[in-house]
Image (cartoon, grey):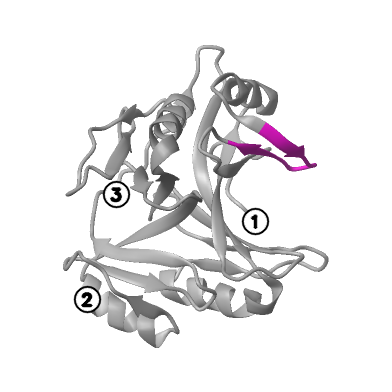
Amino acid sequence: MVAFLDLPGEVHDAGADFWAGVTGFERGPQRGEDGQFATLVPPAGTDYLRVQRLEEDTPRVHLDLHVADPAAAGEETAALGAERLDSPYPDLRTMRSPGGFVFCLVPEGGDVRPAPRTWPDGHTSYVDQVCLDVPPSRYDAELDFWAALTGWQRRDPRPGSEFGRVTPGADQPLQLLVQRLDDEQEVVTAHLDWAASDHEAELAAHVAAGAEVQGRFEGWTVLRDPAGTTYCVTRRRPGDRPE
């Protein structure tokens, strides 16, 4: 699974440079018919973070799921309740989940998980999670869908919690957190989460790179990047696996 940061054109370069800086990944050359895509390339292992220039004004996150046969996977995904969307790219399938979250089924890529980045002060950090932000009326159907689609280990929210999970094997770079929002919204959205061995050091590095802190909570801190993308630095440490 690969996460795309979809950034509005006017702030695309600032956002892409920010994410390259805080991940320690090299920003690859622009590619695509209109030069709209770029990859954040780790020092070793398979890339799993990419950026896309949008014509729209609002940043967002979407996912690419790597599959053996996108056409066949598209049929199977539709049978689980997804809607197929039009796409200019014949070698992939663009889909919309039951809750309205857009993702793509693409040909298989690499499978070597990069190591967390070690910074000069010795702390490590890593983007290791996609959080799906799900309106309450769509929560059960969305969790059912992603568990069935991925075949990963499902964990329903514990009593009093708004968080469920769909957890892959340790070789995968990204896991899925499925959050039930307090309020309704039109569709499911997503944001990225970080794990860091030193929470405060990681926050300081992000703020120095241009992020703004939006709120502090017991288990995470919410930030916004220079392109307006909201994300979280959690208090999980790199390598922690959810129970």
Cβ atoms at labels 1 and 3 below 8 Å apart: no
Q: Name the amino acid, label 1.
A: Glu
How far across and down, in percent of the image, does residue 45 sit? 30, 37
* Residue at x 70%, y 73% (from the top left corner): 136
Residue on which the image places disc 1: 243
Relative placement, left or right, of 238 versus 77 is right
**Residue 76 numbered tag:** none
Residue on which the image places disc 3: 111
Cα distance, mark 2 to mark 1? 34 Å
Taking the magenta stretch, the answer to whether it contains residue 223 is yes
How packed mark 1 is, by other alpha carbons closer than 10 Å (few <14, some 14-19, many 20 or more), is: few
Relative placement, left or right, of 164 versus 228 is right
| Of marks 3 and 2, the one in the foreground | 2
Task: Determine the secondary structure under disc 2.
Answer: helix
* Nearer the observer, 198 or 37: 37
Magenta span of residues: 213-224
Predominant SS of the magenta segment: strand
Relative placement, left or right, of 112 versus 14 is left
* Nearer the observer, 181 or 44: 181
